[in-house]
Image (cartoon, rainbow, N blue to C red):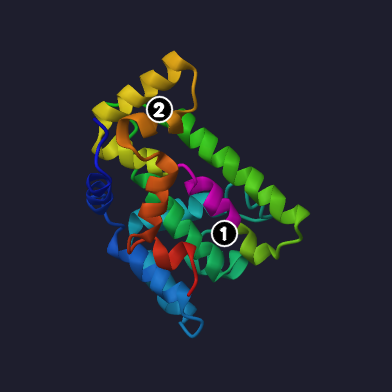
Amino acid sequence: MPIKRQDIVNMVERMPAFPHSVHRVLELTSDINSDPKELVEVIEHDPVLILKILKLVNSAYFGLSQKITSVNHAVVYIGLNTVKNLALSTAAIGMLPRKNEAGFDMDAFLMHSLSTAAIAKLFTKKMHIQSRESFDYFLSGLLHDFGKVVFVHSMPTEFHKALLIAKEKGIPLYEAESEIFSINHTEVGSLLAEKGSFRPILWKP
């Protein structure tokens, strides 16, 4: 018997919230009048966030000619909007359960998400999108399948069944999910985006 849609909505509501520091970063970077110094202070008070942001800033993705050693320099080099999205992406990736009851390959999932994000970033060059906005496309690619994480986190047994059905019948996973849940991971991702944590990030009023 398919799981009721309201059960899925409740499941989404029970997903872990982002840390307070991430929320504060998003608030500050959404305000054009905010002081960059305040943003730096918030990040510097979260050891995990600062380490992850500096690691990403110094990765091959940004290709900077010199190593960035402080959040202040990161803001100067890559801008407030990119720092905002880095905060969200590091928080999202940190939620991924590497070992799970669903038997879902999280390493393959992360590789697929990063590959999609990189391709989305390449499209921005073809479409002549301004560089300061291009990371929004990268982020969208990174999170496009995040509904799967909701299933893994909240309904691992049922999601494992969906994985088996997709493999045995040779059908797309979203079709197998619809058989089990009456909803697929793309729709769950949309519901998650409507949750308080995501709405002000992915859509601007």
- Which of 47/86 is in front? 86
Q: Which residues are magenta?
A: 136-145
- Which of 72/49 is in front? 49
Which residue is the extreme one toward the bottom? 33
Which residue appears at 65% of the width and 51% of the height?
121
Q: Position of residue 144 (x, y in %)?
A: 49, 46
Q: What kind of residue is marked 2?
A: Ala
Q: What kind of residue is marked 1?
A: Asp
Which residue appears at 36% of the width and 53% of the height?
192
Q: Position of residue 54 (x, y in %)?
A: 49, 55
Q: Which residue is mark 1?
A: 136
Residue 20, quarter of the rendered image: bottom left
**Magenta span has 143?**
yes
Mark 2 to mark 1 CA distance (whole Å): 30 Å
Which residue is the extreme one toward the top? 168
- Secondary structure of the residue carrying tag 1 is helix
- Which of 126/59 is in front? 126
**Magenta span has 174?**
no
Which residue appears at 42% of the width and 14% of the height?
168
The quarter of the image holding the N terminus is top left
Q: Which residue is mark 2?
A: 176
Q: Image check: 52 left or right of 11?
A: right
- Secondary structure of the residue carrying tag 2 is helix
Q: Eyeballing the image, is 106 above or below 84?
A: above
